[in-house]
Amino acid sequence: MEILDHLALGFSVAFTMQNLMYAFVGCLLGTLIGILPGLGPTATIAILLPSTYALDPTSALIMLAGIYYGAAYGGSTTSILVNLPGEISSVVTTLDGYQMARKGRAGPALAASAIGSFIAGCFGTLVIAAFAIPLTELAFKFGPAEYFSLIVVGLIGSVILASGSVLKALGMIVLGLLLGTMGTDVNSGLQRFTFNIPEMSSGINFVVIAMGLFGYGEIISNLSRGHETREVFKVKLSGLYPSRADWKHMMPSIGRGTVIGSILGILPGGGAVLSSFAAYATEKKIRLQPDEVPFGEGNIRGVAAPEAANNSGSQTSFIPLLTLGLPPNSVMALMMGAMIIHDIQPGPQVMTSNPELFWGLIASMWIGNAILVILNLPLVGLWVKLLTLPYRWLFPAIVLFCAVGAYSLSNSTWDIWMLGWFGIIGYVFIKLGLEAAPLLLALILGPMMEENLRRALLLSRGDWSTLVTRPISASLLVLALALLLALLLPSIRKRRQDAFVEEN
């Protein structure tokens, strides 16, 4: 079979010593960041992106991918041990995982998380491999009008799946689109919104904006909260393996969570986050067995299902990026930026022009999932000790690393000033309850949307009807309109709000 030949190529690339090392480094960093409060995969990738400039493109993407699903995996450790979700998608895990730890069942909880994440991650990678070729063939049928319409769907979809106010999310998208227009217009050569500042002629680097909003913004927010004390229980890590009853309950829930995450992870706007909430809600609707404890009191299904969902969702979110060149969330937007930095144009041509990179990245995900299982269970004690480090020791290193990374972009202190200003803006966003992820998506997709719209109008000699006369483009615009109208329905708004409310 053709897919087996492609996977054989991928494993031959991923199993080189260099790529194995970067997969390990990415998984280790991702796990480390996943357990630290205030930092997630978006901030971590934004901070570490400049360090990948000197790497081979395949190695760079393998490491960044390891950071992404490593953070999604690592957040479960502290969610279970100390009731502290290191990542948004791990919030649901605290509801039953921490209660299991308090009852001396931290071992089975951690094992359920590890097993669920491993199974789901492998399944998600298999989904990528299976759907990559047909979706790439579909993508070759896309012209400028279709890509414009697809980006519109992605931006509107990110509003629905972003937490918080719809109006605020729309405002952040508009702000991101405006920031994307700053700089020199490619077609006319005229400068737009540069305010006669020479350094603005190329616009503001998206890496600087991402590091400021997600890195510095979170640091300022954490420092503003002051010293917080949190109850920490001494948990027993004996009896690591689940009992026969645990296996009976958690395996079906892992299967359900894996399927839910694989589907929702593809959606724009944080599908991996939404999938963990959806998986937990699904499990609660399934009748409890006589030997099960209620949800919220240490039910192992409440750990296995959301962890499987968020890990499979993290994997399948690569599908639209690798096949259509469209990032479904802010982390994938940064991955897309990394590809552009290494002179790789995301989209269907990646499979034909860079098959080693495409299939090597997919094969490395299997390796990464195995590394995560081997890493997490033996190092639980180390992760718990790391949580005892005062935050005042951690944030100076992050500030310095971000500043060095910003300066390395163009060897200019201007980028450091921009980093600081966007850090302040990021803090203001947090205080106002504004989510920065839609802004980053719009910032990345905005120039693409403008370019494809111009190209479509150029090919049609200025006829706007080309957007609705082409079948695929028209279908996508109808879908975008349907999503927009759905936001106006009270029932949809209520379900959307309830999905992101932590249950007590």
Image (cartoon, rainbow, N blue to C red):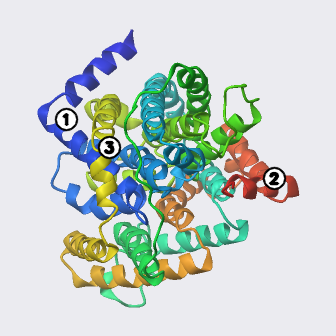
Give the number of the disc on residue 492.
2
Image position of 448 with respect to 181: above or below: above
Report crowding for label 3: few under 14, some 14 to 19, many 20 or more residues within 10 A (C-alpha): many
Report the amino acid beneath label 1. Answer: Leu
**Residue 143's image quarter?**
top right
What SS does tag 2 mark? helix
What SS does tag 3 mark? helix
**Residue 172's image quarter?**
bottom right
Q: Quadrant of the C terminus?
A: bottom right
Residue 8: tell me if it is visible. Answer: yes
Residue for badge 3? 66
What SS does tag 1 mark? helix
Q: Is residue 41 left or right of residue 320?
A: left
At x 76%, y 46%, the residue is 478
What is the CA distance from the residue labelled 2 to the residue labelled 3?
Answer: 35 Å
Residue for badge 1? 20
First-in-chain label (1 vs 3)? 1
Q: Is residue 41 left or right of residue 484?
A: left
Report crowding for label 2: few under 14, some 14 to 19, many 20 or more residues within 10 A (C-alpha): some
Report crowding for label 1: few under 14, some 14 to 19, many 20 or more residues within 10 A (C-alpha): many
Q: Is residue 19 left or right of residue 335?
A: left
What is the CA distance from the residue labelled 1 to the residue labelled 2?
Answer: 45 Å
Residue 380, position as x, y percentages in the image: 32, 45
At x 67%, y 30%, the residue is 292
Residue 144: tell me if it is visible. Answer: no
Report the amino acid beneath label 2. Answer: Ile
| In the foreground, 206 or 265 | 265
At x 40%, y 31%, the residue is 239
| In the foreground, 8 or 282 | 282
What is the CA distance from the residue labelled 1 to the residue labelled 3?
Answer: 11 Å
